[in-house]
Image (cartoon, rainbow, N blue to C red):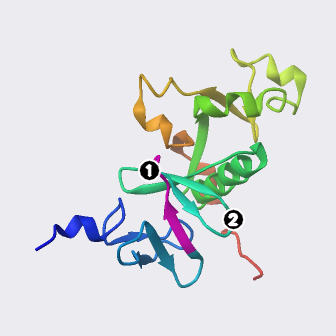
Amino acid sequence: MPHPAIDYPAFGPEIRCPHCRHTIPALFLTDTYLCPRHGAFEVSTTGELIHVVSGRCWHQWEGIWYRQHIHVDGLRFEIGEALDQLSRQSRRATQITIAQRYQTLFEGRLGRELPSLKRLYLLGHKLFGIPVVFSPTPQVAPRWMSVNFEFTTVADTAAQLSYPRFRTR
């Protein structure tokens, strides 16, 4: 009887779709997973999950998929969405730590808000008005090979007193 791991791709018989988080199956005897909503994902020889249609790439760390960005706008959008989620949880970010691999993408784009406020922070980098630092190297902290950013947060008592935000959609 053949070994069961040979029949499935690198991440097992099923994974969670990086887009919709639904469990999706692996195709038998291939390195491909198929989401009925988002299409095929292939496992590359380097262990990345690649969306066949768009070419977008994900790395997995501790069971969570992290999209690997090639343009600063995609990462800024993801950070903006995460900040919105924090706000809904009555939390506020006091600092953003961004993976060091994105430092060259952000050069010249951080801190454009107000030069006078930029001097208040030791590093001088801000994004959405929040101080930014870059992570240690992946050799020091391997999770930064996959993780894109993280927040230092505090409870936002002002958000708890404000009215909830209603969406029109």
Q: Which residues are magenta?
A: 40-47
The residue wearing badge 2 is: 54
**Amino acid marked by disc 2:** Ser
Task: Indicate whether 49 appears above or below 40.
Answer: above
Check if mark 2's residue and mark 1's residue have beta carbons within 8 Å: no
Q: Is residue 44 magenta?
A: yes
Report, in whole angstroms, how far the alpha carbon at label 2 lies from the one at label 1.
18 Å
Give the position of the N terminus as an image quadrant.
bottom left
Q: Residue at x 79, y 31 (%)?
A: 110
Q: Quadrant of residue 3?
A: bottom left
Q: Quadrant of residue 63?
A: bottom left
Q: Residue at x 55, y 40 (%)?
A: 151
Farthest residue toward the front? 1
The residue wearing badge 1 is: 47
Task: Indicate whether 8 appears above or below 35.
Answer: above
| In-front residue for pair 137/32 | 32
Q: Position of residue 30 (x, y in %)?
A: 41, 70
Task: Indicate whether 15 appears above or below 130.
Answer: below
Q: Secondary structure at mark 1?
A: loop
Q: Position of residue 38 (x, y in %)?
A: 60, 77
Give the position of the C terminus as an image quadrant.
bottom right
Q: Residues within 10 Å of mark 2 (few under 14, many from 20)?
A: few
**Amino acid marked by disc 1:** Gly
Q: Residues within 10 Å of mark 1 (few under 14, many from 20)?
A: few
